Amino acid sequence: MCDSCGCSITGGNPARVVPDGRTVHTEEARAEITLAADLLAKNDHQAMHNREHFERHGVLALNLMSSPGAGKTSLLEATIEALGDELRIAVIEGDLETENDAERIRAHGVPAVQISTGNACHLDAHMVHDALHEIDLDEIDLLFIENVGNLVCPASFDLGQHRNITLLSVPEGDDKPAKYPVMFRAADLVLLAKSDLLPYLTEFSPTRAEQYLRRLATLAPFLEITTRDPEGIDPWIGWLRDQVRDMRAESGQEKTSQASREAPFSGAEGGQGHHLHHRDRRDRTHAYGGE
Amino acid sequence: MHELSVCLALLEQVQSIAQERGATRVERILLRVGPLSGVEPLLLKSAFPLAAAGTLAESAVLDIEAIPVRVHCSECGAETTARPNRLVCGRCGGFRARVISGEEMLLASLALRVPDQHPSG
């Protein structure tokens, strides 16, 4: 509590207690200040810094979000198996209490940094920044950030990623995009995971799930995947390759070139206006060619 | 829930603005929040006393103005209100709709108590 203004002693009374115990009455004025400050400005600033950091090192950063148990870690394991020889991958794991997910990833020979979030329901840009101290970005091409399993909170926090990927697994039901619109409209790609279960869970209609998604006025691709079949993640792998290719085309440089580190992505300082950038809350359009 | 994180970020901003202005306390905080921000006004309100404890805004009133969701259709040009889970054009049903309001999570205004430069005694 404040010792200088006496607010702890007098509550709403505008009296000032001076060090010798004398009480001095002062006039106080009420000042109204009009602002338009984003509440998450500090997080957004850190996220922008993270993104610039990724781009300086030619790293594509992807934020994976879903409910708990939708299959984010299994998808990453299968992805490492499929692309490990082609691209250098690292993973930041946001887990509540355990190192289990990070250990699963490390078993595939890929560096994984665990952010133990305790009871936190989401990752923020500062947590990701801290984890980056443990990753050599010059040694990787692709960074996956596996967010905390939660379809609500992670949607509000920009981490500095280039793309958001949201998984919807078949056992969850096809109306999730209608129930969690903020999450699903933040997605640049929606993956219908565990599609091998569709023959058993016949109440799940992929068509209906996509209709709910389209009602959010988003054109994000909607791809069915399963990690139970060697070819089951091909659409996802194809999408990933496209993203990496687009990023490299835009930087005009191969990752290994020194120039790409010094003048990343068309040299835009601060990176504003770059199409690879995560669209922040103010810039999102979700329009069909509207921009 | 993440509303406590949002509230702590809010209080950090409020505290720094109040200190900059030499305020002795913050009387009122006005936020503008849209449903597509992912933040629940009621949860923000319940997190507020916890986040505000020990700050200049400890006794402040937190008011939250709800911002409606509105979309602009680039097909038919209409501007219509929408629901968070139905963001297509309210007139033609088109998908080429752009959200023009409802994503806000803004600190809109502050009422501060600022001591007079010349105490009356």
Image (cartoon, rainbow, N blue to C red):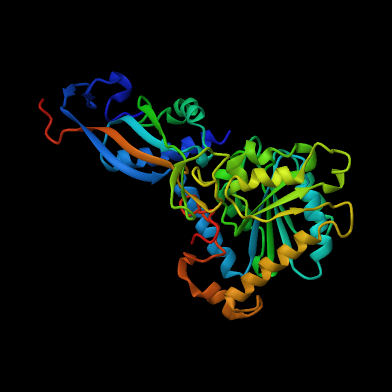
Please report the residue visible at 15 percent of the width from the left and 27 percent of the height from the top: A27
Q: Position of residue A40 (x, y in %)?
A: 47, 45
Left/right placement of residue B68 relative to residue A153 reads left
Residue A188: give x, y in percent of width and height: 62, 55
Q: Quadrant of the N terminus of chain A?
A: top left
Question: Residue shown at 47%/55% (left/top)?
Answer: B74
In the rendered structure, the answer to whether residue B119 lies left or right of residue A16 reads left
Q: Is residue A273 above or below residue A71?
A: below
Corner quadrant of residue A151: top right
Q: Is residue B67 left or right of residue A115?
A: left
Is residue A110 something that shows in the picture? no
Using residue B87 as the reference point, say whether residue B57 is left or right of it. Answer: left
Closest to the observer, B76 or A120: B76
Give residue A259's quadrant in the image: bottom right
Q: Going 16% across and 33% down the picture, which residue do you hit?
A: B116
Residue A82 picture quarter: bottom right
Residue A287: image x %, image y %? 53, 55
Q: Is residue A238 above or below residue B93?
A: below
